Amino acid sequence: MSAQDLLMQLRSAGFRLDAADNKLFVVPASKLSEAHRADVHAHVGELLQLIDAEYAHEAFEERAGIMEFDGGMARSDAEAAARILIANARGKHADD
């Protein structure tokens, strides 16, 4: 099973997956089966990357939308500025 499949399977089963400080949290952890625990353990690095990418995408869309609608920027300019903000927040260059 791929990490993406596992993420979708867990979410469809009612679990919430969060990441903080390079740690993965599955809620409610007490409801995880032993098989799911083993799968999560096997894919923890990939799951963290997937969740981080989701957070970055959500933050990008939110910032671009705010700059476009509240700031009156053209969408293309708002997206360019949002890429820079997200990259800086993640400690990366916008073109990485």
Image (tube, grey):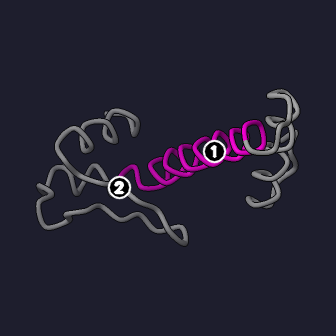
The residue identified by callout 1 is 62
Quadrant in which residue 60 is drawn: top right
State how many labels appear: 2
Q: Is residue 72 left or right of residue 70?
A: right
Is 66 placed above or below 45 here? Answer: above
Q: Which of 78/91 is in front?
A: 78
**Residue 90 vs residue 44, the one in the foreground:** 90
Image marks 1 and 2: residues in contact by CB distance under 8 Å: no
Q: Residue at x 19, y 63 (%)?
A: 28
Label 2 crowd bin: few (<14), some (14–19), many (20+), radius 10 Å: some
Q: Amino acid at mark 2?
A: Leu
Residue nearer the viewer, 90 or 71: 71
Q: On the rendered structure, is 78 left or right of 54?
A: right
Which quarter of the picture shows residue 5?
top left
Is 59 part of what is drawn in magenta? yes
The magenta stretch is 42-69
How far across and down, in percent of the image, does residue 20 sit? 50, 68
7 relative position to 80: left or right: left
* Above-or-below relation of 80 to 32: above
Calculate the distance from the C-alpha at mark 1 to the C-alpha at mark 2: 21 Å
Which residue position is annotated with label 2?
17
SS for callout 2: strand
Image quadrant where one finds the N terminus: top left
Would you say residue 76 sits in the magenta stretch?
Answer: no
Q: What amino acid does circle 1 point to?
A: Glu
The answer to whether 12 is drawn above or below residue 22 in the figure is: above
Tell me the residue at 41%/63% (across/down).
24
Query: Label 1 crowding class (10 Å Cα cut-off): few <14, some 14-19, many 20+?
Result: few
Residue 95 coordinates in the image, percent (x, y) = 87, 39
**Residue 16 coordinates in the image, percent (x, y):** 30, 54
